[in-house]
Image (spheres, rainbow, N blue to C red):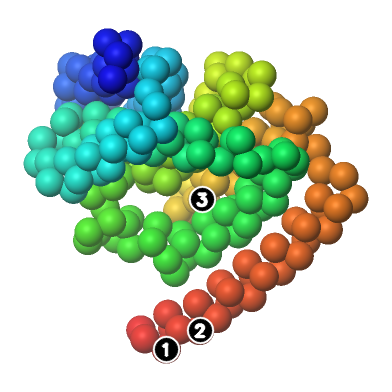
Amino acid sequence: MRASSLTILLGPALYAALALALVGRLPALEDAMGLVLACALFSAAAIGAMAVGARAKLEMNAAALVGLGAVVGALLATNSALHASLVLVAALGLGAAFAAWVEPRLSDLSVVVTAAVCLALFDFWSVKFGPAHHAATGGFLQRLLLDVPAPDGWTRFLGISDLLVIALLAELGARRGIGRARVFGAGLLALWASLAQAYVTRGAAPALPWIGALFALAAWKLVRPGRDGWLRTARWSGITVAVLAVATVVVRLRA
């Protein structure tokens, strides 16, 4: 790996340093507003860290190895600041690797809209019955949430899947002529929108629908589907709904 490959570590390291400086020092406000503001602030810090780290020059295999190594490290880390930086490195590495693998195979970029709709449907299901629900309630998958400084200490807020999808879309967009800054900006707005939804509804809110929608708006000229693209999206959406319906029945039978 070239020296510039180490840039993937710089943004996450800056995030960890800022988090360490502010943990326990943020104002506690009524009605959970202090926590909401902390999450909004560190959503921006996380996206900024990823924007810095995404400038790293990594080949696909190297990015995949870095990402997988960071996932293992995140599962084992006990220090919150180190854990947060490893989650960010994992999202960057795996997102860049997958974008490098899939981009040459995409002749029609409107397939991104199809994938975004299916992921959004899965995320809606996940926060009620699937991995996101189990991560929020504790257990193994909680190890892959991003640590965020809150007024009363560390909390875990963003899932690695949300960060990974943003990193993937930013790299994919960059390879097709869309500035990473635009995609990361759309990703940040999506995280803030899901946070606002969670605050208003007083419950978990999926971020992937917001991420997909705002990326589509940011890159509409590239991803706009034609007639065949909309038919493909409808077909795969129906398949996704059917699979999730079966999965819901299985989950409830096992409960």
Q: How far apart are marks 2 and 1 (CA)?
A: 6 Å
Q: In which quarter of the image is residue 138?
A: bottom left
Residue 173 or 44: which is nearer the viewer? 173
- Mark nearer the viewer, 2 or 3: 2
Asked if residue 202 shows in the view, the reply is yes
Quarter of the picture containing the N terminus is top left
CB atoms of marks 3 and 1 within 8 Å: no
Residue drawn at (63%, 50%) of the image: 115
Residue sitting at x 69%, y 51%: 114
Q: Quadrant of the C terminus?
A: bottom left
Q: Mark 2 points at which residue?
A: 249
Residue 220 on image: x %, y %: 76, 31
**Compared with residue 247, is residue 20 higher up or lower down, i.e. above or below?**
above
Residue behind mark 3: 206
Q: Can residue 150 be seen in this view?
A: no
Circles 2, 1 touching at the beta carbon (< 8 Å): yes
Q: Where is residue 125 in the image (x, y as percent from the top left)?
A: 52, 64
Question: Looking at the rendering, which quadrant does residue 189 occupy?
Answer: top right
Going from N to C along the chain, the mark reached first, 2 or 3, is 3
Q: Can you tell which mark lies on residue 253?
A: 1
Q: Which residue lies furthest to the top in this view?
A: 3
Q: Which amino acid lies under the numbered mark 1 shown in the image of this protein?
A: Leu
Q: Is residue 170 left or right of residue 213?
A: left
What residue is drawn where x is 81% and y is 50%? 229
**Residue neighbourhood size for the residue with mark 1, other residues' Cα within 10 Å, grouped as few (<14), some (14–19), many (≥20):** few
Q: Describe the element under mark 1 as helix, strand or loop.
A: helix
Numbered disc 3: secondary structure = loop
